[in-house]
């Protein structure tokens, strides 16, 4: 007890910028980082881990280190990263509902050495005073539908027993539940949304994201409609050319060079209007039926042609998995291995989705391309078709 009093009276050094800070200051006056809690007497269960929080710490705090979650992890040996950096971060801790966030997707597709675990991993580990192996909580794949998340600062994990018992001790900023009694009440209720209301918390502070999942194609299409020249009218091909030119002019003159996606989730998430420039797509049947696919490709600088152009200008066959054995695929597969070798590639619909999510062109490899088995099947079907034609 006396030890901690002496400690709190002496100046401390900010771990981020290294300057000396007066004892009375709870956070660094320069970079706003909070004073780390003394770790002595606390099991260092997260030592060696660099954590990054995704969707957990409210942006309204002066610095992420003011949140209870950060300080809990830090006191138990973790290094918390303000910026997600794949060369440092080795565990991504996400809020349920963020299973399809940019960062989670990056970890699951490209930086697979970084496991993505829900915040319950952290709190369960703290409750048990041991590091539960992240593999047990690790997200295995990007789900097609994310878990629902909630509005307001009171999140489901605020009802976790460890959080309820310790949040007050750890929080530097205002607690979501404000006082301990209300927090305890929150712990016994199952309806988080109602509680936000009951606690009189202003929902306006937090962005309006209820679901993190929505089709990137639809989002991009909606975003591209913000430019007045992009209407969904039925138009003939000449008109379309005209529209494309106008749209390009508009894109270059507009102050924002990109299409903004998922405004509430990420302020930086923009799609370059030249993302697909130079690519000429032939769409499989079920994608032709979706107006938005064509809209989005064109909004991103690509072109869509009919299957008649398979042997000439087409560069990419974009197909939906359910169309993978249709006639177009058989012909395209043949063309890609003979007359159009090296000139025609294949990509699944998910490739386009993921490109839009990441805002960059992902190489068309592995899961985005037809499997060897599918290619063999298509080749066989082609031979059969030839034989029938010959008869
Ligand atoms: Zn500092």
Image (tube, grey):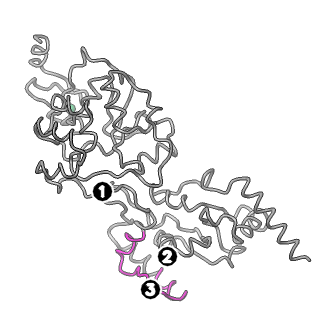
Q: Are marks 2 and 3 in contact (CB under 8 Å)?
A: no
**Above or below: residue 234 compared with residue 363:** below
Give the mark toward the camera: 3 or 1: 1
Q: Quadrant of residue 271?
A: bottom left
Q: Secondary structure at mark 3?
A: loop
* Some atom of ligand 1 lies within 8 Å of the CB belonging to the residue at label 2: no
Instruction: Kindly give the residue lying farthest to the top in the view shown.
Output: 2
What's drawn in magenta, residue-wise? 221-244
Q: Which residue is mark 2?
A: 291
- Label annotation for residue 178: none
Residue 226 is inside the magenta segment: yes
Please rate how many residues cluster around mark 3, counting C-alpha atoms within 10 Å: few if below 14, some from 14 to 19, many from 20.
few
Q: Which residue is mark 3?
A: 233
The tag earlier along the polypeptide, 3 or 1, is 1
Between 245 and 310, the one nearer to me in the picture:
310
Please rate how many residues cluster around mark 1, counting C-alpha atoms within 10 Å: few if below 14, some from 14 to 19, many from 20.
few
């Amino acid at each position: 007890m006396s030890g901690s009093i002496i400690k709190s009276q002496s100046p401390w050094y900010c771990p981020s910028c290294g300057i000396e800070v007066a004892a009375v200051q709870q956070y660094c006056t320069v970079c706003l980082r909070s004073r780390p809690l003394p770790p002595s007497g606390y099991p260092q269960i997260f030592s060696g881990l660099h954590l990054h929080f995704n969707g957990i710490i409210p942006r309204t705090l002066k610095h992420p280190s003011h949140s209870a979650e950060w300080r809990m992890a830090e006191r138990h040996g973790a290094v918390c990263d303000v910026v997600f950096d794949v060369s440092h971060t080795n565990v991504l801790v996400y809020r349920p509902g963020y299973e399809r966030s940019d960062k989670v997707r990056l970890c699951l597709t490209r930086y697979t050495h970084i496991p993505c675990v829900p915040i319950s991993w952290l709190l369960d580990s703290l409750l048990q005073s041991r590091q539960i192996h992240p593999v047990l909580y690790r997200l295995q794949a990007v789900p097609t539908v994310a878990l629902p998340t909630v509005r307001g600062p009171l999140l489901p994990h605020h009802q976790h027993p460890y959080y309820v018992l310790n949040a007050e001790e750890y929080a530097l900023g205002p607690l979501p539940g404000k006082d301990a009694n209300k927090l305890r009440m929150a712990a016994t209720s199952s309806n988080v949304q109602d509680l936000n209301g009951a606690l009189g918390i202003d929902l306006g502070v937090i962005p309006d994201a209820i679901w993190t999942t929505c089709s990137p194609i639809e989002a991009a299409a909606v975003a591209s409609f913000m430019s007045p020249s992009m209407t969904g009218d039925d138009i003939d091909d000449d008109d379309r050319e005209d529209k494309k030119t106008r749209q390009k002019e508009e894109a270059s003159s507009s102050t924002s060079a990109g299409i903004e996606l998922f405004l509430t989730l990420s302020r930086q998430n923009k799609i370059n209007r030249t993302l697909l420039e130079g690519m000429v797509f032939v769409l499989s049947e079920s994608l032709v039926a979706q107006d938005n696919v064509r809209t989005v490709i064109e909004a991103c600088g690509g072109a869509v042609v009919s299957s008649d152009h398979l042997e000439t200008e087409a560069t990419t066959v974009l197909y939906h998995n359910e169309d993978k054995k249709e006639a177009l695929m058989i012909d395209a597969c043949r063309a890609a291995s003979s007359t159009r070798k090296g000139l025609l590639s294949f990509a699944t619909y998910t490739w386009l989705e993921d490109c839009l999510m990441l805002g960059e062109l992902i190489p068309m490899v592995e899961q985005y391309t037809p499997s060897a088995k599918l290619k063999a099947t298509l080749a066989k079907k082609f031979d059969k078709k030839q034989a029938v034609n010959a008869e």
